[in-house]
Amino acid sequence: MEIRGSRVLVTGANRGLGRAFVDVLVARGAATVYATGRDLHALEEVFGGCAGVTTSEMDVTSDASVSAAAEACGEADIVINNAGLVLHAPLLASSGMADARAEMETNFWGPLRVCRAFAPRMRQRGAGALVNILSMGALASMPFVGSYCASKAAALSMTQGVRGELAGTGILVVGVIAGPILTDMAREHEREGRHPPEVLAHATLDAIEAGRTTVYPDPTSAGIGDQFARDPAAVEAAFAKLR
């Protein structure tokens, strides 16, 4: 699938990796980029007047909002499920279950809602790509973000399941196992060693064009991916030491 001339929808587009995706898509010649997010005003502040970019409200935690966005942007050839939430919560935190539920709602149920809304339209056309932005935390858990990692692990399994259900339909389902990204979601003391979001955006779009179903888009995730293929237990043990 070619990026040039395609119609691409990006969730969580107003900042960070989502904004980088929109900018890179425009630079690579996408015909239309649907920049979506919960705050339409914020999207219009960022992208208002940008040629080739159409802003549309979509809250991935709302069935009604996702359905409405699918009606408005249903011609999308490629959907990039980028919207995410990390609350830096351990699984056994004393604050209760609210953080874990919120992360699961955004990081698992959110992309599943979007896939369910757009897959039928792509199936009718016999072509398309669904792209889920995941994390190294989907492979093994990090104690300081345990519930986030659990939500991404669930999203990885969902991505594999959707891929299996859509096999033979002409729809590419891509899982992006991202490493540390230099975005607003990173806490100040965690910013060292993070990769510019444009690196991940370009690598993801390259994978779509090559028809690859799994991509490790940065040097850190690529190294972890190689290690995980050889010795998953070693990755789990290494991640367990992170604080």
Image (cartoon, rainbow, N blue to C red):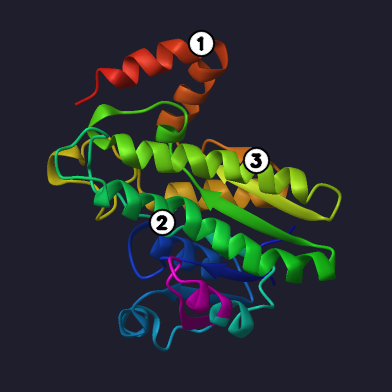
Q: Position of residue 192 (x, y in %)?
A: 21, 37
Residue 231 marker: 1
Q: Along the polypeptide, which appears first: circle 2 or circle 3?
A: 2
Looking at marks 1 and 2 on the same chain, the residue that comes earlier in the sequence is marked by: 2
Kindly indicate the quadrant of the structure image that contains residue 147. Answer: top left
Looking at the rendering, the stretch of residues picked out in magenta corresponds to 52-67
Label of residue 105 in the image: 2
Is 226 located above or below residue 168 in the figure?
A: above
User: Would residue 77 be visible to someone looking at this image?
Assistant: yes
Above/below status of 17 relative to 32: above
User: Which residue is the site of mark 3?
Assistant: 160
What amino acid is at disc 2?
Glu
Q: Position of residue 190 (x, y in %)?
A: 19, 38
Residue shown at the point (48%, 51%) measured from the top left: 108
Query: Measured along the vertical axis of the image, is residue 124 above or below residue 178?
Result: below
> Residue 183 at x, y = what percent?
29, 53
Spatial CA distance of label 3 from label 1 is 21 Å
Query: Does dot 2 land on a helix, a strand or a loop?
Result: helix
